[in-house]
Image (spheres, rainbow, N blue to C red):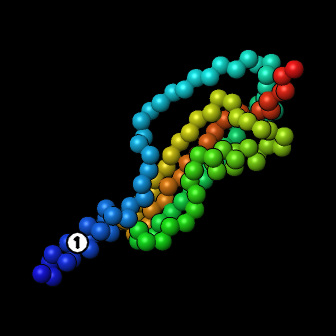
Amino acid sequence: MKLSVCILIVVFFITGCMMHRPLMLPTVTTLNVPEQNYEILKNEEVSGSASDSTIIGLIFFGDSGLNAAYNDALSNVKGANTLVNVRVDYKLTNILYIYQSYTTVVTGFPAKIKTVK
């Protein structure tokens, strides 16, 4: 009886409260926007990140969403309202299922969209 209770507890902590992530399939999306519609503000790439963490699968904190990482990258350059040539990377850190951290990193060139008349 004690063995089955221990197995159930282990299964609960290992699988039931894991951080769920999107399916990681490589995808490429291309959107061609004429260069006269935007102005690149900085000729260097900027990056932003967003993280969330869990401790023992019971305490969750943070926001690893794509929007949070995108806004963090935009905050690095004054006047930028979009990124061009964007890449998205993900990092997962796991220490014996006691501590898990998931980070989304967005990298791109800061740009400003021009108003079209």
Q: Would residue 35 be found to the left or right of residue 100 on screen? A: right
Residue drawn at 73 percent across, 17 percent down: 34
Q: Quadrant of residue 107?
A: top right
* Residue type at numbered disc 1: Leu
Q: Locate residue 116: give its quadrant.
A: top right
Q: Position of residue 80 (x, y in %)?
A: 80, 38
Q: Circle 1 sits on which residue?
A: 8
On the rendered structure, is 73 left or right of 103?
Answer: right
Q: Secondary structure at mark 1?
A: helix
Residue 46 can be seen in this image:
yes
Residue furthest front as drawn: 117
Image x and y of residue 47, in percent: 66, 43
Q: Is residue 39 visible?
A: no
In the rendered view, does 15 fall on the left or right side of 90?
left
User: Up-down: is 59 above or below 68?
Assistant: below
Q: Is residue 28 left or right of residue 19?
A: right
Q: Position of residue 24 (x, y in %)?
A: 42, 40
Residue placed at 70% from the left, 47% from the top? Answer: 71
Residue 7 image position (x, y, % from top left): 20, 72
Q: How many marks?
A: 1
Q: Residue at x 46, y 53 (%)?
A: 92
Residue at the far right: name it.
117
Residue placed furthest toward the left: 1
Q: Which picture quadrant has residue 26?
A: top left
Q: Quadrant of the C terminus?
A: top right
Q: Is 76 located above or below residue 29 in the figure?
A: below
Figure quadrant of the N terminus: bottom left
Q: Please report the residue visible at 43 percent of the width from the left and 72 percent of the height from the top.
A: 58
- Within 10 angstroms of label 1, few (less than 14), some, or many (20 or more) residues? few
